[in-house]
Image (cartoon, grey):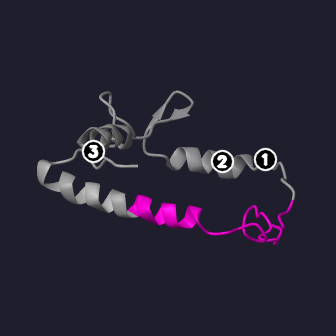
């Protein structure tokens, strides 16, 4: 597949990244190299390779969930919280109204 500027701009919109003109040519070349690697992988004979899921046969051992009501601990945590509104704990916004992170760090 040959990538052109139109494809790159579409990918940038999907990835929500801003591309500058000086970055576009390098990024196009890098993406072409990546796609070439995938072409090489498609040529590898995998007829005698068993399919895998997850890459390991290790099992995760976990304990069962325990429902425990420790009211004193909960009440102390709520009392120590800096901001409350009614019975809810207030936290700073995570996302802005315009999209992206509220902290501006996107």
Q: Please report whichever mark, 2 or 1, sits nearer to the chain's N-terminal start.
A: 1
Q: Please report whichever mark, 1 or 3, sits nearer to the chain's N-terminal start.
A: 3
Majority SS type along the magenta span:
loop
Q: Which of 97 and 56 is in front in this view?
A: 56
Q: Please report whichever mark, 2 or 3, sits nearer to the chain's N-terminal start.
A: 3
| Mark 2 to mark 3 CA distance (whole Å) | 57 Å
Count of residue discs: 3
| Mark 2 to mark 1 CA distance (whole Å) | 8 Å
Establish if 25 lies above or below 14. below
- Compared across the picture, whether 45 is left or right of 30 comes to right
Q: Which residue is drawn at 23% across and 44% down?
A: 18
**Does 43 appear in magenta?**
yes
Label 2: few (<14), some or many (≥20) within 10 Å? few
Residue receiving disc 1: 69
Single out the mark in the foreground, 1 or 3. Answer: 3
Residue 82 spot, x, y in % from top left = 43, 45
- Compared across the picture, whether 96 is left or right of 50 comes to left
Residue 76 spot, x, y in % from top left = 60, 50
Residue 104 spot, x, y in % from top left = 26, 45
| Mark 1 to mark 3 CA distance (whole Å) | 59 Å
Label 3: few (<14), some or many (≥20) within 10 Å? few
Residue receiving disc 3: 4
Residue at disc 2, secondary structure: helix
Q: Nearer the viewer, residue 102 or 38?
A: 38
Mark 2 in CB contact with mark 1 (< 8 angstroms)? yes
Q: Tell me which segment is drawn in magenta.
A: 34-63
Label 1: few (<14), some or many (≥20) within 10 Å? few
Residue at disc 1, secondary structure: loop
């Amino acid at each position: 597949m040959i990538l052109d500027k139109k494809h790159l701009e579409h990918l940038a919109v999907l990835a929500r990244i801003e591309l500058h003109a000086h970055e576009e040519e390098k990024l196009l070349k890098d993406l072409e190299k990546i796609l070439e690697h995938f072409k090489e992988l498609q040529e590898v004979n995998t007829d005698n390779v068993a399919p895998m899921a997850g890459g390991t046969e290790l099992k995760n051992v976990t304990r069962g969930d325990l429902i425990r009501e420790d009211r004193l601990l909960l009440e102390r945590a709520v009392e120590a919280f800096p901001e409350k509104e009614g019975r809810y704990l207030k936290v700073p916004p995570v996302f802005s109204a315009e999209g992206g992170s509220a902290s501006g760090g996107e």
